[in-house]
Amino acid sequence: MTDGIWEYEGYDPVDERLRESLCTLGNGYFATRGALPECTADDVHYPGTYIAGCYNRLTSEVAGRRVENEDMVNVPNWLPLRFRLDGGQWLTPDTATVLDHRQLLHLASGLLERWTRYGLGEGRVLVVRQQRLAHMGDPHVGALRTEFTAEGFSGELQVEAALDAGVTNSGVARYRDLDGRHLIHVHTGTATTDTVWLRCRTRTSDIRIGIAARLTADAPATARHEGRRAVQEVRLHLAEGRPVVIDKTVALHTSRDPAISDPLYAATHRVGRAPGFDVLVDDHLTAWDQLWRRADLDVPGESGRILRLHLFHVLQTLSPHTADLDVGVPARGLHGEAYRGHVFWDELFVLPYLNLHFPEVSRALLRYRHRRLEQACTAARDAGRRGAMFPWQSGSDGREETQQLHLNPRSGRWLPDHSRLQHHVGSAIAYNVWQYCEASGDAEFLHTKGAEMLLQVARFWADAAVYDEGMRRHRIRGVVGPDEYHEAYPDATRPGLDDNAYTNVTASWVLSRALELVDLLPEPRRRELVERTGLDGSELEQWEDISRTLHVPFHEGVISQFEGYGNLAELDWEGYRESYGDIRRLDRILEAEGDSVNRYQASKQADVLMLGYLFSPAELRELFHRLGIRLDEDTWIRTVDYYLRRTSHGSTLSGLVHGWVLARCRRSEAWKFCQDALQGDIADVQGGTTGEGIHLGAMAGTLDLVQRGLTGLETRSGALWLDPVPLPELSSYGFAMRYQGHWGVRLRLQRGQMEIIVPSSEESPIDVRLPDRAVRLEPGETSRLTLLG
């Protein structure tokens, strides 16, 4: 890789799924994997296209049970473009001789370039060069330019372009027992001499999809319609050494889009007035230039290049176009079908970055949650609770989408899935509301939709907490923590654990923030909220009490992950590493042996240590103090050491969180985990999972590690708080951000100094707080601060 270009050299079928994920192009509305247009879906290639928020629900027969799943739909494939010499076979890298092959992802411009030399025998070579874009200026448009050059011969080339609705959701091997046929009522037709169209519907959600494709070449195109495909064919004359170009421009719409009547009409109309490829590229580049200016990140070396790739994929999934959509944060981006395109809690790792660059996108993602608040309140009532119980996995309408069964590929067994008990997702939503409003200064959202969500999550926790007379503490029972390995006590007949430390501490935080917010609200708005929710003084008193008395278990002088964690058996870590090598998915290994990870002190990823990710050391001490517990530095460091020795890092988020935490308490080891987080997808450390879709939370989290983790940047109490911890491996870097009304505030750390530049504007000054001083910066002012050693 060179600066600004992610490059793959040569063709290796084993690497194709990974490359296709990492070469995905998107614009926040749709994304298409980086598959070669001449290749169809098989065990090597998977050319999926996904439209944000386009879900469909199907029921399958699995392990003797009827299982319902909602999936992000693999919509009709707009890429197909294959070619062959007159009378020859269709050329693909798997069936023809590949002399050279390169694939280049241009990050600055959002273009995917491909260059292949096919050997045709007898000294004949066909050179294929392609450029592809998912237009960042017009989110409904995609385009593919293909240039053919003959070497050592002249002759006729047959080119066939298509729109293909014969696709299924089959990109994840372990889901293939599930029904993946989402598209029905496929119709195709011809709009003009150079344009064909395809329309269809999803089977149960009844989303109408319209796609139109325009083919531009030096020769006329003929159209035919066969089953679920609209096909255009062109015969090109190749003269030796003279490039011949063919352009394919497409437009995609669904019935979920605002300001349209019919998606097919919108698609054909849009593609008909779309400019040529060169003009499309110019407009596309302008849009990307604007994005890069707002998200500017200047980090040197290899780490900087990987961070730029991560930023590229975050922006392709959650661009400013997202602000117009009713969508959440898909955990695997719009890059593949892992997790079925569901929304988990990954916004906890994504929104803190977006808040300081694209707050309008953060607001839209929080509105996705607010639109589903009523469903969360219904779920809580159905469970016998008050307040809002948000689902662990979300999709189209806010109901719980967590699967009832999951497959262990090691044992081949379908097992019960209890991860829906991760109710801490509600705390994550509340945290994101608070963080967004602190960073953006959006008091209107905080006082309206934000307050409604925060208060209902607080009400849920207050109702879930049960007072224990013996402990004289409140307890929250029957949950699953962020670790995810532990879903029950050994040999228990019911799932769930008691007093997960992360759950209880964050619940206390939610309750205290809700109380603070009630005091902050303007009196007329407070009255409205009280009338709407039935909130009264006695309930607020209960919240105050519970926020100070939630139980946090300890054992051996460290915070317990949950009550009884210290009583679990110790695992033979070295023995398992020696036997299996990679033990990231220790749960699958043990289940295949007939054992259970529930029996052991073993964590998949950070659980207790997530507290050090969300809260600064000072904030964490204050939280524990509110609970009547003294958390000194030695106790925290012991806790960090304890769980470091017992974590298998089975999630790409694990290295990120551990790197963040260690940067604050043991800097010498932090960089190893930061590197793990940076390498997670590009090195496919989980052995094939990246080919099913990138890990968006980990990618955004690495950006935020630089932006907030290493700078100690917090937005709270109307000020920017900074407490830098420069690592030797990353001591000089800079970035721009948007803080409240200030666009383009720049921070740069270099050799023990921090420079802060506030651009000129009519906004109020920015208060900056460092551990040893406070400064106020006026718009147009630059401050250079020497940091303490």
Image (cartoon, grey):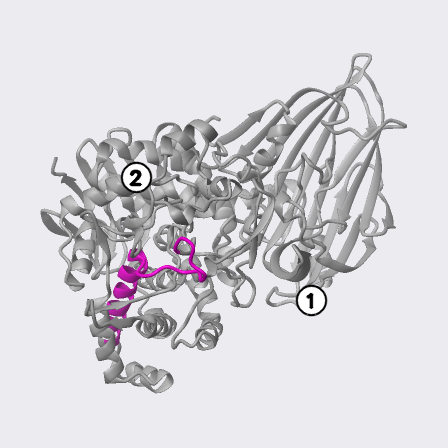
Visible residue check, residue 75: yes
Q: In which quarter of the image is the C terminus?
A: top left
**Residue 269's x, y, as percent?**
71, 59
**Please, which residue is most extreme toward the bottom here?**
531
Residue drawn at 67 percent across, 64 percent down: 207
The span shown in magenta is 489-518
Please name the amino acid that badge 2 sits on: Leu
How far apart marks 1 and 2 lie (CA) works out to: 48 Å
Considering every residue shown, the one lying at the far left of the view is 772
Residue found 65% across the figure and 60% down from its top: 65
Label ID, residue 579: none
Q: What is the crowding at mark 1: few (fewer than 14 residues within 10 Å), some, or many (at least 20)?
A: some
Location of residue 636 in the rendering, given as x and y in whole percent from the top left corner: 19, 46
> Which badge, 1 or 2, is on the more N-terminal residue?
1
Q: Is residue 731 visible?
A: no
Rendered residue at 62%/29% (across/down): 14
- Asked if the magenta segment contains residue 503, the reply would be yes
The one nearer the camera, 627 or 574, is 574
Local crowd size for mark 2, using a 10 Å CA cut-off: few (<14), some (14–19), many (≥20) = some
- Residue where numbered disc 2 is placed: 644
State the image coordinates of residue 673 (x, y, percent, origin top left). Answer: 34, 35
Query: Magenta stretch mostly in which secondary structure?
Result: helix
Viewer-closest of 784 and 33: 33
Q: Residue furthest front?
A: 491
Placement of 726 over or under 55, stated as above or below: above
Which type of secondary structure does the marked residue at label 2 adopt? helix
- In the rendered image, which residue does mark 1 sit on? 206
- Viewer-closest of 517 and 515: 515
